[in-house]
Image (tube, rainbow, N blue to C red):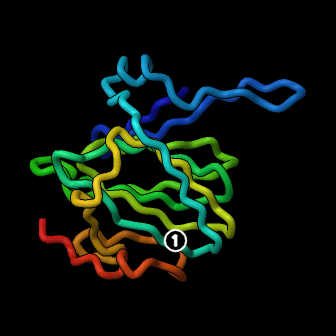
Amino acid sequence: MLYQETELTGAFILEYEPIRDERGFFARTWCCREFAGRGLNPALVQCNISYNKKKGTLRGMHYQADPYAEVKLIRCTRGSIYDVFIDLRPGSPTLKKWLGIELSAQNHKMVYIPEGFAHGFITLEDNTEVFYQMSTEYQPKAARGFRWDDPAFSICWPIPVERISQRDMSYERCTL
């Protein structure tokens, strides 16, 4: 796999390297030894799928509070998304900075998001599926979020939001 560190320390863009033949390709998308060797948290204890029927569906901005802060490894397995993550780590030089990247079934990119970040995405196509691997099991009592349009972050979403849950609409603005 190829690892590219982002300007948000600890967050990486990963690409798997397909081994192609006449059948298609084979690729590794996760390796405990490689992650640990790069100082990344290799503990992945839960996997989830998010299926989104329509383009313009926004999910976010979500995180889990300590002591349940989680690493997320995100990839898009069908369709495409604009994936956004925000540094919420107190004392971090990139506190409140965000980064967005297009993930798609075609570009083979993934994002490794460390503990202490909020995460969300908007779908760029109908029938989009997102695959998450997390280092900690979901804890409803630790679930937190910020509004997707919070001026504290000024996220530039590439398309208008057409669908969003009531829960995501009800999040308060950032108080960090």
Residue 54 position by quadrant: bottom right
Check the image and name the residue furthest to the right: 22
Residue 102 position by quadrant: bottom right
Residue at (57, 43) in percent of width and height: 109
Q: Residues within 10 Å of mark 1 (few under 14, many from 20)?
A: few
Residue at (24, 47) in percent of width and height: 69
* Amino acid marked by disc 1: Pro
Residue 98 position by quadrant: bottom left
- Between residue 111 and residue 165, name the one nearer to us: 165
Residue 159 coordinates in the image, percent (x, y): 54, 75
Q: Is residue 120 left or right of residue 171?
A: right
Residue at (48, 44) in percent of width and height: 47
- Between residue 116 and residue 66, name the one nearer to us: 66
- Between residue 110 and residue 59, name the one nearer to us: 59
Residue 67 coordinates in the image, percent (x, y): 17, 45
Residue 18 coordinates in the image, percent (x, y): 69, 29
Residue 170 coordinates in the image, percent (x, y): 30, 81
Residue under label 1: 158
Q: Is residue 34 left or right of residue 135?
A: right
Q: Is residue 6 visible?
A: no
Q: Quadrant of the N terminus?
A: top right
Q: Say what secondary structure mark 1 lies in.
A: loop
